[in-house]
Amino acid sequence: MAEAKLSGVGVSPGRASGPVVRVTDTIEEPASTPGPDDPYAESALIGPAAEKVAARLETMASAATGDAAAILTTTAAMAADPSLVSQAEQLVTAQRIPAARAVYEAAGHFAQALANAGGYMAERVRDVHDVRDRIIAEVLGIAPPGVPELTTPSVLVARDLAPADTAGLDPAKVLALVTEEGGPTSHTAILARSIGIPAIVAVRGALTFGAEAVVVDGDAGTVEAADPAAPVVTATAGGAAEWNGKGETSDGHPVKVLANVGAPTDARAAADAGAEGVGLFRTEFCYLDADDEPGVDEQRSAYAAVLEPFRGKPVIVRTLDAGADKPLAFLAPEAEPNPALGVRGVRVAFDRPGVLDRQLEAIAGATADSGADVAVMAPMVATADEAAWFAERARAAGIARAGVMIEVPAAALSAREVLEAVDFVSVGTNDLAQYTFAADRQLGAVATLNDPWQPALLRLIGMVGDAARVTGKPAGVCGEAAADPGLARVLAGLGVTSLSMNAASVRAVGAALACVTLAECERAAEQALAAPNAQAARTATK
């Protein structure tokens, strides 16, 4: 008898059911023969094909907003990368291979380099494969792989979804997403949450699951066979419309509901969603495509555009999160054997304090320009000494409130000492999970270890919450865990004082907190901490 139920990691809440559409995930590997009669004419096919792909992605980005726009813009930049085109052209002329094969091999070199870098850069391998397949399809004059045109509302099942595919999804036609690969911070997860549809990743056997219709439960992380004749059911996390816009439990205990942003479009979407402020402003957008360090005035203007929608409201700006696994040309990072454990985050500033000081100067200026209530925090802090070093520089730059991110287990274990050195902390659950469990957060095979409901992770967060109570200072959560309405209650019970998430989740999380008391949150936290695994923690707190 065929299996009637599969399990994975629920990354976007809600329940939906309907017919299955399976997605082709990659293009057929091009052949190396026959060689071209005119290698130079053959190589000339590559540049125009890449330009067309980049232009198409840029058009999609201009029509999108928030996370979708940012992901499409980044993918378009990859397609337009002159080094990829140049390497492919050289392969054609030097090895006399077809253009399609040359693009395949050149992209393979780039993807391998990213995979070797680990961390954030390894997360971009899927993006390179997507760009590769689109350019090859353009060269060959065939349709690229990806999501087919949907005629009826359907559940998409795929090995993984390319960034452009996820960013272009129509929530009126896509009931839910199920992938065999990916993790809680994959593009599939982020964009499913942003458009408000259920999603489950790391579902082994999803593509060979024989059911023609399924029920997807994003809360439980299950996929079950359904009757193909049954009516389509669309249901997402409920209650969002009932939130009054004030982050607190039903008995008045405050838990600020904030947003994560990384560009002006994100900030406007967050303000429109009713976020009480920003718990994580990622500043990397100002640096990613820069060959030279952006000047103070350029940074100031860029930051002010993001801060402007939150005049008079709290905004926490994270300083540059870069390093060997997020290489920036002007930093000239040295090669490292394990970049995820190397010089990244605040550690870059220890070697290049001028970069941090200029960024802090720009943030202080943007604060004055925008009228937002700005604080700053440093990424990848491991010790209280590091926290104190950062706070001193921030205050010297004229920024009154300084904090740090808790992403390294050592920082969680010494949270009280860290909080004594700064004004607040914010837990980045994405990195904290992968460092706690020694599990790459983008690797589907270990995605269950990065589930934010893992009791061991919650116990570390609980230690941070305890330290916040003792010191009387705020402790937020700004990882993807904060976007889960059910987990939000547990986090509040652990002593977390603010939650920061994508704009689409703001109202659902606010509503979830508003219908429970603090005592109920604390009981849910106790049950989750005592659970033997993530699934049991979810079940115990329902």
Image: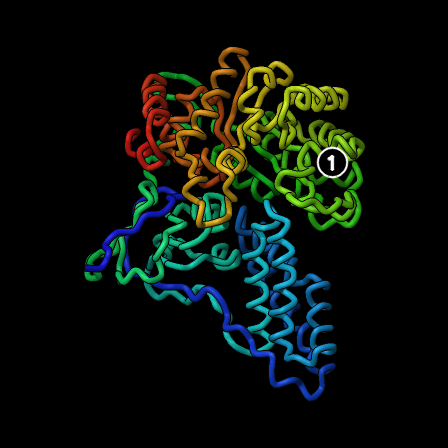
Question: Residue 69's spot in the image, x, y percent?
Answer: 56, 51
Residue furthest to the front: 337
Q: Is residue 134 above or below residue 238?
A: below
Q: Residue at x 64, y 25 (%)?
A: 375
Report crowding for label 1: few under 14, some 14 to 19, many 20 or more residues within 10 A (C-alpha). many
Q: Residue at x 68, y 32 (%)?
A: 346
- Residue type of the residue flagged with mark 1: Arg
Nearer to me, 362 or 214: 214
Tally of marks: 1
Which quadrant is home to the N terminus?
A: bottom left
Q: Mark 1 falls on what kind of element? A: helix
Using residue 214 as the reference point, say whether residue 181 is left or right of it: right
Question: Residue 32's spot in the image, x, y percent?
Answer: 60, 79
The residue identified by callout 1 is: 300
Using residue 159 as the reference point, say whether residue 408 is left or right of it: right
Question: Residue 259's spot in the image, x, y percent?
Answer: 52, 34
Using residue 503 as the reference point, say whether residue 38 is left or right of it: right
Which quadrant is home to the C terminus?
A: top left
Q: Is residue 340 above or below residue 252?
A: below
Nearer to me, 299 or 437: 437
Q: Residue at x 20, y 58 (%)?
A: 227
Q: Is residue 31 above or below residue 386?
A: below
Q: Is any atom of residue 317 visible in this view?
A: no
Q: How is the image coloured?
A: rainbow
Q: Residue at x 36, y 18 (%)?
A: 518
Question: Residue 481's spot in the image, x, y percent?
Answer: 45, 35
